[in-house]
Each structure stands twice: as C-alpha cells, then as structure tokens.
Image: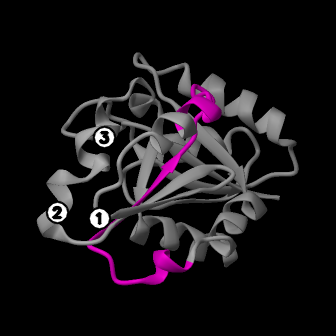
Amino acid sequence: MKYVLLLRGINVGGKNKVSMAELKDMISHLGYTNIISYINSGNIIFDTSDSIDTVNQNISKILNSYSFKINKVILSQSEYLEELENLPSWWFNDLYRKDVLFYTNEIDHSLMRARIEQMPLQDEAVHFGKNAVFWGKYNETSYLKTSYHKYLIKESFYKSVTIRNSRTFEKIAYLLKK
C-alpha cells in the first residue's frame, strides 16, 4: 500500500532542520520501498504492506529521535486521493490563494471545525474534508482582511496543523497516482 507522510514545521527559516535524504534513509531501514520526497518541507511517499497503525508507530519512533517535536499526518493513497475527488467546485477556480490544512493527531477536529465555522468569512471559502480543511482566498487585495489571516493563525490548534498550498497538494496527488 502507498502512504504519504506530511510533516509540520520543519526546514522553515533555518529552524527544525530535517534532511530529507536522511529521513528517506531511516524510512528505508523500516523496509519501506519506493520512497519519494517532494520539496524540502516534509512530504514523503512510500510503499509498505504494514498497517496504518504500524506505519504510524514506526514513523513516530523515527521522528522522536529528533531534538524537537515534529507533528505529522500519515494518509493512505486512497484517503489522500479521496480528498481530491470530493473538493467543492470553487477549489478549481482561479483564486488568489488556496491552502490545505491537514489535521494532525494533536487536533480535536470537531473543535477546530466549530472554531472555523464561527469565523466571519471575508472574500474566502472553506470546505471541511475528512482529513483536512480546504481554504480559498479570492483576491490579493482582501487577503489581509480574511479570517484566514486575521483569526486562524491566532487559534491554539493552528500550531498543530500542517499546511500545503494547492500546488503542493496537487503535486503530491500526482505522485501518489504514479
């Protein structure tokens, strides 16, 4: 089975450095195969016959070897691609910015959803998927007035989500389909 591992907050601004080559090597020592990393922000795809629970435990052991905490999301190929298949029509429009906020194990999804639903949307759209929140901002001039910019980043759960822009989200989907 193919899985995708998404890491939060690594290799940003010179902090929490994780070498993708070293991480791929550690993952290969688990017996996982066909390991691909995409850009330096913690996107790794691999194959294994292990269950999701075993994969989660094994990857957690690797990540716990670092001197800083790394939140993660691990999704099967089908879970990830199901998100792509169930996107709302607005996602395919030419928006200023589109982001995918993946839920990590650290997040209470229902609390996150309730908090976001209370936010006044300003020239933006939100879709709640099974494994992520999809957030679109319509134009650049209103971006600083959006709830995404004004409220979301102040929420306690914000530091526990791992965010990918639409290009990265779609590139990972492409790599999962190969």
Residue that appears at 30% across and 47% down = 147
x and y percent of residue 31 in the render?
A: 76, 45
Q: Secondary structure at mark 2?
A: helix
Query: What amino acid does circle 2 point to?
Result: Ser
State which quarter of the image contains the C terminus: bottom right
Hey, which quadrant is residue 11 in on the image?
top left
Q: Which residue is mark 1?
A: 123
Query: What amino acid does circle 3 point to?
Result: Asn
Crowd class of label 2 (few under 14; some 14 to 19; many from 20; radius 10 Å)? some
Q: Which residue is mark 3?
A: 11
x and y percent of residue 1 in the render?
A: 83, 58
Q: Nearer the viewer, mark 3 or mark 2?
A: 2
Q: Is residue 140 left or right of residue 17?
A: left
Is tag 1's residue or tag 3's residue first in the polypeptide sequence? Answer: 3
**In terms of depth relative to the viewer, which is nearer, 52 or 47?**
52
Q: Can residue 108 be found in the magenta stretch?
A: yes
User: How far apart in space, not on screen, are marks 1 and 3 (Cα)?
Assistant: 31 Å
